Image: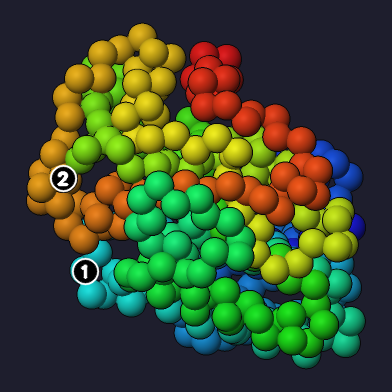
């Protein structure tokens, strides 16, 4: 298969290029200005509204992961605008270009996030659960709607509602590790908020599962079947690292340190049930947190 990937320099994209290449697929990267020209790269500039410079390429599938990093900066109005625009306008730009191709791809796999649901306490969240409220929920709704343009034109469109992707190389876990390795980690707020998570290996497996299963379209929750409360996540991480996890960060301190992001990323509760991966027979490699963390951190 010839697979076009956006956001290919990111945590998921860079692993996916390796994984798909190893499985015998041909990958093409959609890259932004500043990236070195290469045979496997096509240029686009979502910031300047410049569409991909396609030249009659035949593409079987597109995996769209691009977007301004959500947790890299405090949420100033400017950063929030970049988070939103890079996803909503970027997705629209990509879909408009794909539907104009002489041979549009059969499949678009487009990222979204579990932030779609907002803060939901102990409620079990599935793909058909309605969106919640808050900044991220609004962004995710608009991001998913933008991908709908491809679906309307007959491209099978799978929306990946990604939960926290676990990797030692990047993302939330990698940011937590220095603190936890020093023995300075602990629960955040009450620690009762649910954290939905998925090992990077399972993101790779589940994306390939979505590519292979033509009956799948629409939202797919990318989460392990075993979400845990923040207190359990912290305790398990401490056990795997053999470090204490007694230093609780109260909610007000998280808000002082991280601003608005604290409520939506650290204190919000999202208890996902990956119903569509489950019912379509995806075999999770790491369904349990303890073995996922042991694999990532002790191998
Ligand atoms: N990792 C997670 O835990 C997680 C959880 C929920 C949702 N997601 C979503 O899943 C997608 C992929 O996740 P990831 O962890 O791989 O993200 P990531 O590491 O932040 O990578 C995203 C990629 O998007 C491109 N990008 C960055 N800023 C951009 C901008 N302003 N406009 C357009 N493109 C930009 C970059 O790739 P290029 O330089 O190659 O263009 C970057 O490497 C993201 O959209 C993310 O929001 C991830």
Q: Is the residue 268 above or below the residue 214 in the image? A: above
Which quadrant of the structure image shows residue 179? Answer: top left
For this orientation, the residue located farthest to the top is 242
Look at discs 1 and 2 and give the one toward the viewer. Answer: 2
Residue in the foreground of this view, choosing between 75 and 44: 75
Give the numbered dot on residue 131.
none
Q: Which residue is drawn at 43% across and 78% down?
A: 85
Residue in the foreground of this view, choosing between 247 and 69: 247
Q: Which of marks 1 and 2 is nearer the N terminus?
A: 1
For ligand 1, tell me if the residue under mark 1 lies within 8 Å.
no
Whole-percent x and y of residue 152? 74, 86
- Residue under label 1, please give it: 76
Dot 2 falls on a residue whose secondary structure is helix
| Residue 12 left/right relative to 134 | right
Q: Which residue is drawn at 64% across and 44% down?
A: 203
Whole-percent x and y of residue 293? 51, 23
> Dot 2, crowdedness within 10 Å: few (<14), some or many (≥20)?
some
Q: Residue at x 16, y 45 (%)?
A: 251
Residue in the foreground of this view, choosing between 210 and 59: 210
Residue 103 visible somewhere in the drawing:
yes
The total number of labels drawn is: 2
Give the numbered dot on residue 251.
2
| Residue 90 left/right relative to 55 | left
């Amino acid at each position: 298969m010839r697979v076009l990937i956006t956001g290919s320099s990111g945590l998921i994209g860079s692993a996916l290029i390796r994984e798909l290449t190893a499985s015998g697929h041909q990958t093409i990267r959609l890259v932004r200005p500043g990236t070195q020209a290469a045979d496997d790269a096509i240029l686009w500039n979502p910031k300047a509204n410049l569409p991909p410079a396609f030249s009659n390429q035949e593409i079987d599938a597109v995996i769209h992961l691009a977007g301004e990093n959500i947790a890299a900066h405090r949420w100033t109005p400017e950063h929030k605008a970049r988070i939103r625009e890079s996803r909503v306008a970027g997705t629209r730009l990509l879909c408009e270009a794909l539907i104009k191709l002489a041979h549009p791809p059969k499949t678009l796999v487009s990222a979204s996030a579990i932030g779609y649901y907002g803060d939901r306490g102990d409620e079990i969240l599935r793909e058909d659960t309605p969106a919640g409220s808050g900044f991220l929920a609004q962004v995710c709704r608009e991001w998913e709607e933008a991908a709908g343009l491809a679906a309307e034109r007959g491209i099978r469109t799978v929306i990946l509602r990604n939960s926290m992707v676990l990797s030692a190389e990047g993302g939330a876990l990698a940011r937590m590790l220095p603190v936890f390795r020093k023995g300075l980690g602990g629960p955040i707020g009450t620690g009762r908020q649910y954290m939905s998570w998925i090992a990077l290996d399972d993101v790779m497996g589940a994306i390939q599962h979505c590519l292979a299963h033509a009956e799948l379209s629409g939202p797919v929750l990318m989460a392990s079947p075993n979400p845990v409360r923040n207190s359990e996540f912290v305790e398990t991480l401490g056990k795997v690292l053999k470090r204490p996890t007694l230093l609780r960060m109260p909610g007000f301190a998280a808000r002082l340190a991280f601003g608005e992001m604290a409520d939506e990323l650290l204190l919000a509760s999202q208890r996902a049930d990956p119903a569509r991966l489950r019912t379509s027979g995806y075999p999770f490699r790491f369904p349990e947190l303890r073995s996922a963390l042991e694999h990532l951190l002790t191998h």
